Amino acid sequence: MPIQVAVLKESRPHEQRVAMVPAVADKLSKLGCDICLLSGAGLSSKLPDSAYTAVRFVNTEQELLVTANIVLAVQPPTAEQINLMPPGCILLSFVYPHKEPDLTRLLRDKHISCFAMEQVPRISRAQAMDALSSQAALAGYYAALLGATKLARILPMMTTAVGSIRPARCLVMGLGVAGLQALATARRLGAITEGYDVRPETKEQAESLGAKFVDTGVDARGEGGYARELTQEEKDKIASVVTRHIQQADIVITTAAIPGRPSPKLISKAQVDGMKLGAVIIDLAAEGGGNCEYSVPGETITQGQITIAAPLNVPSLLAEHASELYAKNLLNLLQLFIVDGEITLDWDDEVQAKTVLTHQGEIKPAAVKAALEQQ
């Protein structure tokens, strides 16, 4: 019997992606999978049903889920969808259990083996499965374009018959995948670029993209590729250096987000109030509350003469390529535990062991289990 793979149709606000695209469906079917989608699942990503050749389409979630061995989604499924899944079913999606405690408990109680895509370990072997990074790269690209369109001037230097126009200055704060892509894109658009991060090892990466690195002398390297919490003394030291660069910039892009936790505040109201007239802030950390104290998640506001945009779910705004990259992440993860047409989970494999959220009635990550038990 082929492995039954069900792909959910996304229903959450701001979500236009789909977890499976035609080219990846063809490859997944060769692993011994029978792929089933709800009709219209790809329309928001500009993928009509007719674009798929290696899948079946059904009209109800009941038909889609009751016999599924594996369920693929972008956002966490609803409680109703989870209740339709058979015990022992495998789910691959973003979950963020700290934001979805009730759904996480339901996954546990229904004996769903859930692999949370935000938990893929950041190790070399797992790069092709790292959905956070693939989506962040698109968000960084989009942030630079959004900043350029919000700015009432051009980014590159231009020489005209009546004189020269100076290039705009772009500061990117947070040099993970999104930040580095934002730097690269702003540079290609002709801006003078600067990069800042509390992790000093990012200096070389920023400079390799033609940007100047803002060095504050504070090292805040943490675990898992993320920055640790800063002390108040460290925050004050950083602010004294970074404020000058913020207030010289035409565009500031912030990208500092920590999965499952509030976004750190990188830009204070006082810093915004001292910015150049007409400057723009693009806050990519809106899901966690934003990096700027003035940011309103999901909205673009004007504070004095400063424009502050805090868009939600930025990768979804590039749904076609975001879906393609995400589907490839899923395929690469599925290839770890689909062996010779059979599902074979291997808990000695670091990627599987660290990505799993719930299995056989248990919440597996100790930190998540402890946090949910305290609620």
Image: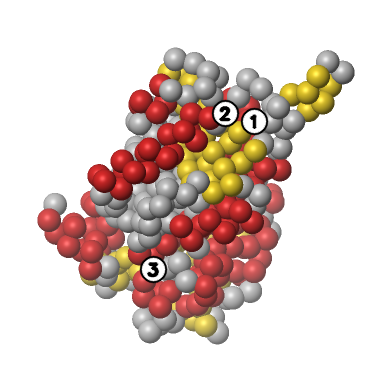
Nearer to me, 102 or 183: 183
Question: CA gap, disc 1 to disc 2?
Answer: 6 Å
Nearer to me, 122 or 313: 122
Q: Amino acid at mark 2?
A: Asp
Please report contact status of discs 3 and 2: CB closer than 8 Å, yes or no.
no
Judged left or right of residue 55, residue 348 is: left
Identify whether 254 is placed above or below 101. Answer: above
Residue underneath mark 1: 168
Judged left or right of residue 58, residue 121 is: left
How many neighbours does mark 1 have within 10 angstroms: few (below 14), some (14-19), or many (20 or more)?
Answer: many
Q: Residue at x 67, y 43 (%)?
A: 187
Q: Is residue 86 visible?
A: no
Q: Position of residue 283 (x, y in %)?
A: 46, 36
Please report contact status of discs 3 and 1: CB closer than 8 Å, yes or no.
no
Identify whether 282 is placed above or below 110. Answer: above
Question: CA gap, disc 3 to disc 1?
Answer: 42 Å
Residue underneath mark 3: 355
Q: Earlier in the sequence, mark 3 or mark 2?
A: 2
Q: Residue at x 29, y 52 (%)?
A: 229
Q: Position of residue 344 (x, y in %)?
A: 44, 82
Judged left or right of residue 351, residue 20 is: right
Q: Which quadrant of the view contains residue 194?
A: top right
Identify whether 77 is placed above or below 14. Answer: below
Q: Residue at x 82, y 26 (%)?
A: 159
Identify the disc placed on residue 250: 2
